[in-house]
Structures are given as C-alpha cells and as structure tokens.
Image (cartoon, rainbow, N blue to C red):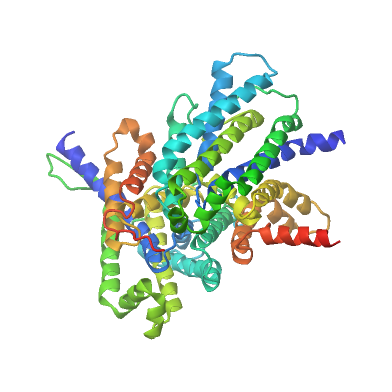
C-alpha cells in the first residue's frame, strides 16, 4: 500500500489538478465562450504563490498551510480582477475571435514572464517551499477544493445564473431579447474560470516546487481544451473526468507498454509517442463524439435505468 | 537613427513581413472558403522546411526513428523549395480529408473543426519529433549557391548592406503574391473558388463541385505554408518541431490585423507587423513577440473586422 501511494501519489494529485483546470475552461464554455485563457491565469496564479512564498514570506519548511490558503486567496483575487479587466472588452467578441484574443493574452503573459526579473526570466523560480512531507498529502488541499468547485458548478447549473449562461450559449441574441444581459453573464463566467485557474496555479507552484514560463503556453491551452471537449462540454462531469483521464494518460500508456509480449516498436511508440496519440484522440473524438464522452443524455439514461430497477 | 539604419530596418521589416504575408495567405484562403481557422497550418509550415531540408540531401541527426537518414538525391535550392512546398501542399490536402471533410459532412459546429485542426497540429509536431528528434537543423552555408552573403544597396562611400537571403525572400514572396492574385482574380479556377467561398450551395447548383475547390484551396494554402517555412528555415534555422507553432500564432495576428478572409489584408497585415517588429529597439528585442500579440489584442477590441475586412453582421 505504501509503495502504491508513493508511486502514484503525485499522479493522483495531478489528476485532480487536471480536473479543476478542465472546470476552469468549462465555466466560460457554459456561456458559450471558447476561451483559451486558462493557462495564462494558471501561470499567473502560480507566479503569485511562487513570488510570495520565496520572496515575501520568510518562513522555514514545512510551509504553513494557512499561508498556502492565503496565497490561493490572493492568486484568486488577482486573477479575478485581471479576468474582469480582460474579459469585459474581450467578450464583445464571439467564437473564433474570442479564442484568438485569449491566445494573444496567454502569449503576452508568457513573453512578460520570460523577460521580467521578478518572475526569474527564462529560468523561472526554484525551491518553492513545501507545506507537506510527500506529494500525496496535497490531497488534503486539492480534494476538498475539487469537491467544492464541483458542488459549486453543479449548483450553478440549476440556478438563474447558470440558466442564463446556458441561454446565452444556445442563442445569445434571443437571450438578450429575453432580458438577460449577455455581457454581464459572459464576463461572470469568464472571471469564475479565471479565479479557479489562478487558485489551481497557486497550489501547483508549491506542488511542482518550481515554476517557469513553460507553465502557460499555447500547448497547455490545447491540452486543457481536450479535457473539456473529449470529456464532455455539456455537463460539469465531462471536464472533471476528462481532466483526470487525460492527465493519467501518459501513465496508462506506460503501463500498457510494459505488458510483456508487445512488439518492441509498439511498446516504444506507446512510451515516446504519447503526444501523437493525444492528438489522434482529439481528431477522433471531435469526429465521433462531438459532445464528448460524458453527455447529459448518457447521465439521464443511467439514472432512468436505475430508477426502473 | 541615421538613414542607413532606417533603410536597413525598412528592408528587414519588408523581408520578414513578406514571409508573414505568404504564410498568412494560407490561413486566409482556407478561412475565406470555410470560415474556419486551420490551426494545423503552423505545423505544415514546419513540415515544408523539413521537406526542403531533406530534398537538398542534408542528413538528420542521431535522434528519432529516422536517425542519420539522408536522401540519395541532392536537389538545388530552387527545385527543393518547389517540391518541398508541393509536398507540404499534399499534406494539407490530407489534413482536409481527415480532419475537415468528415466534420463538414456532419455539419458540425465550426469550433469543433477548429479543435480537430489543433489535434492534427499536435500529431504532426510530435510525429516530427518522434521521427527526426527535436534538434535544431541549419541549412548548409552553400544553400543559395554562389550568391554573395550580402548585397550593397547604397553607394561605395555610404553602404547599405542587406543579406542576400532577405533579397531572395522578398523576390520569391513578390512572385508568389502576384501569381496568387492572378490565379484568384483572372482565372476560371479563381472565379470558382470565389464562388464557393461566397456560397457553396449556390456554387454547386451552378455546376461547381465545392469539395474539389476546397481541396484545391487546401493545396494552395499548404504550398504557401511550406514555402514560408522553408524561407524562414533556410534564412535562420529550423528550430525544432515546434518552430511553426509560434509562427502560426503570429500568423493569427497578421490575418486579424488585415481582416479575416481578406487576401490583400493578409499582405498588408504581414508587411505591417514585419515593419513594426523591425523597428523594435534592440534593448527590447526580447519583447518583440509580444508586440504582434499586443497589436492583435488591441485590433480585436477596436476593429475586429481588421483593416481591410468586411464588417461583421450579427444574424438571428
């Protein structure tokens, strides 16, 4: 058991972080906004935590959990504010224009992170203090946070605000004429996603121990987008499951590659070609599962068949 | 800033700007016909550079599946550039078949097709890395034959030296843009392409097979992308499998600045961003990449239809 935990502890925490990043992209998508800004806010949140814990709070390890929570709060607030500042003007754009604007936003943040002194330039920030002895203990923070965010989004889908999001997703002009203010709700959805990504970034900076400009790139945008679109973009369970499965995918492929009897070339491909497989899954997924793997219909069918039993 | 430096900056800007322009034309052609941005275009750009490198008989490094591979043929640069770009165009046609056509048949949401093209980009980039490794490849110094390294555009007393590579780039781009303008505005094919872009259903009623012209568009787009890739790769170096991704993102800035789907817009946008970047002072050159995205972001907020684009009408 101990062996198992020490081997896979890092993976479990990464999977939960992946699930939350999926949710951070799902929130704007609830209101029909394809935003690729999450990696930018994730990177920003991580820098906030990394700078605070290495330069401002001068404490010895183990790093106090109260301070970690404070950093998460500060990262959330900063990302939320930036989310409003960027979101309000950018959300006048639709569809592909918004996606391009958010790509530009992520790239600008990345170039800044690469060149400013406070972010450690290309090298980044090292030796971010650890609040825990082993990676698995991060579950104390990330598991409750995931449950809270899931409960929050679940609730959100049921109340007026969430229904307004969905109305805007289905038809923005019609929603507008029904008295829903699209700009307000779109900015709200965007900002909620920004806050979540920032908070996850703050934890990740500690979890990964080092933080640099590679955390917020266009590649990361594609990967998070895959979490949502292949997992399912119509219910919050989709991004959560998508985030977990796709974060674990490299490990799964490695495990398959280790099964005895596989031809050498295939085993090697499974180990080194995981991103090729990742890309193929995106292409196949968009073609055969346009709503993702977890769809509301699927959930409804399941609950109905259970009720009949 | 004295006159020499000014002129040098202008010529440098026009040279890199003309590469941006032909690369962005590839984006624009596909967007004008399908209304979709093909995110795999940056990966095709990368492939074009690798193809030309290979066709010139240059060997790969010792990483990846195709380690130390070198083709037994040695084409001169001009021919290798031509066939390398053709190969890139064929890859682009293949991408249309695998990632665009099935979704178009199902009348899928255009954002889904965008995601599918992102998936293709991920596959190509990592396939390159899997096959030939991630190292930087530099074209050998005799790539351009016997051209001198620089040409003097000034006088003996007041020289304005420009790298001959940049002259080559500028000339090739000029020829390509003229040919493309001719193809689109003066030939039957161009007319049909424009008809499909305007309205595929009406075009098919008039006896034009939209799929055929979509394939043609993808071929031309891939050809232009591969050509741009080779020009950048041979003038600087092929900076690994990812080098097209960053360039691809900058291409987005170019087409948005010029106006999505506008052909003259792509040229104007490319030259503008090339010139602006050339005039970023040396002390701030690290921020050069941010300039294009800054322009892009502001442009989207102020005038999303771009400099030369048609204004957007919201339809119910």
Say which of B146 and B22 sits in front: B22
In which quadrant will I find the C terminus of chain B? bottom left
**How far across and how far down the image is residue B88, in percent?**
45, 64
Q: Locate residue B156: give its quadrant.
A: top left
Q: Residue at x 48, y 70 (%)?
A: B93
Q: Locate residue B4: give its quadrant.
A: top left
In which quadrant will I find the N terminus of chain B? top left
**How far across and how far down the image is residue A84, in percent?**
45, 37
Q: Residue at x 47, y 37 (%)?
A: A83
**How far across and how far down the image is residue A33, in percent?**
50, 51
**Is B223 displayed left or right of A222 in the figure?**
left
Say which of A257 and B248 sits in front: B248
Residue A106 visible, this angle:
yes
Is residue B75 positioned above or below A209 on the image? below
**Is A12 displayed left or right of B93 in the figure?**
right
Question: Residue farthest to the front?
Answer: A179
Say which of A23 and B221 sits in front: A23
Is residue B62 positioned above or below B216 on the image? above
Residue A214 visible, this angle:
no
The tally of labels here is 0
Q: Residue at x 31, y 46 (%)?
A: B302
**Is A10 displayed left or right of B22 in the figure?**
right
**How far across and how far down the image is residue B75, in percent?**
41, 65
């Amino acid at each position: 058991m101990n062996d198992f935990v020490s081997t896979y502890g890092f993976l479990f925490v990464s999977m939960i972080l992946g699930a939350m990043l999926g949710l951070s992209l799902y929130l704007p998508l609830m209101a029909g906004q394809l935003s690729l800004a999450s990696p930018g806010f994730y990177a920003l949140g991580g820098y906030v935590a990394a700078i605070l814990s290495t330069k401002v709070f001068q404490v010895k390890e183990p790093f106090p959990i109260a301070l970690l929570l404070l950093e998460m709060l500060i990262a959330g607030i900063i990302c939320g504010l930036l989310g409003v500042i960027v979101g309000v003007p950018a959300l006048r754009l639709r569809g592909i224009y918004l996606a391009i604007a958010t790509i530009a936003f992520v790239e600008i943040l990345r170039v800044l992170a690469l060149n400013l002194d406070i972010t450690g330039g290309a090298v980044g920030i090292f030796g971010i203090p650890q609040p825990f002895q082993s990676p698995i203990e991060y579950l104390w923070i990330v598991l409750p946070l995931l449950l809270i965010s899931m409960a929050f989004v679940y609730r959100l889908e049921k109340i007026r605000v969430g229904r307004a999001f969905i109305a805007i997703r289905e038809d923005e002009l019609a929603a507008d004429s029904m008295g829903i203010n699209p700009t307000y709700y779109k900015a709200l959805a965007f900002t909620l996603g920004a806050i979540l990504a920032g908070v996850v970034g703050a934890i990740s900076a500690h979890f990964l121990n080092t933080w640099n400009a590679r955390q917020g790139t266009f590649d990361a945008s594609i990967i998070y987008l895959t979490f949502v679109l292949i997992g399912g973009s119509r219910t919050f369970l989709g991004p959560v499951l998508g985030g977990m499965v796709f974060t674990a995918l490299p490990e799964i492929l490695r495990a398959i590659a280790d099964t005895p009897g596989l031809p050498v070339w295939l085993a090697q491909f499974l180990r080194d070609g995981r991103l090729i497989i990742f890309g193929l899954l995106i292409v196949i997924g968009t073609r055969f599962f346009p709503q993702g793997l977890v769809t509301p219909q699927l959930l409804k069918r399941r609950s109905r068949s259970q009720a009949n039993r | 800033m004295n006159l020499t430096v000014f002129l040098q900056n202008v010529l440098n800007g026009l040279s890199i700007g003309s590469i941006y322009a032909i690369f962005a034309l590839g984006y624009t052609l596909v967007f004008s016909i399908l209304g979709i941005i093909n995110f795999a275009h940056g990966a095709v750009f990368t492939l074009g550079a690798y193809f030309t490198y290979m066709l010139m008989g240059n060997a790969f490094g010792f990483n990846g599946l195709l380690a130390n591979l070198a083709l037994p043929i040695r084409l001169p640069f001009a021919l290798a550039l031509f066939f390398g770009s053709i190969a890139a165009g064929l890859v682009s046609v293949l991408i249309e078949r695998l990632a665009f056509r099935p979704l178009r048949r199902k009348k899928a949401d255009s954002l889904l097709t965008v995601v599918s093209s992102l998936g293709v980009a991920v596959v190509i980039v990592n396939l390159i890395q899997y096959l030939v490794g991630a190292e930087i490849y530099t074209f050998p110094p005799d790539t351009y034959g016997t051209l001198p390294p620089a040409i003097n555009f000034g006088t003996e007393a007041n020289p304005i030296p420009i790298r001959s590579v940049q002259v080559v780039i500028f000339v090739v781009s000029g020829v390509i843009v003229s040919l493309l303008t001719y193809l689109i505005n003066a030939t039957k094919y161009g007319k049909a392409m424009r008809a499909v872009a305007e309205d595929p259903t009406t075009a098919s009623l008039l006896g034009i097979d939209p799929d055929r012209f979509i394939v043609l568009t993808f071929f031309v787009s891939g050809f232009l992308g591969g050509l741009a890739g080779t020009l950048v790769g041979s003038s600087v170096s092929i900076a690994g499998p990812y080098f097209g991704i960053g360039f691809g993102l900058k291409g987005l800035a170019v087409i948005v600045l010029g106006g999505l789907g506008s052909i003259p817009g792509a040229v104007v946008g490319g030259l503008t961003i090339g010139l602006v970047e050339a005039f970023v002072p040396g002390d701030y050159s690290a921020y050069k990449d941010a300039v294009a995205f800054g322009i892009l972001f502001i442009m989207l907020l102020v005038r999303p239809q771009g400099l030369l684009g048609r204004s957007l009408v919201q339809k119910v």
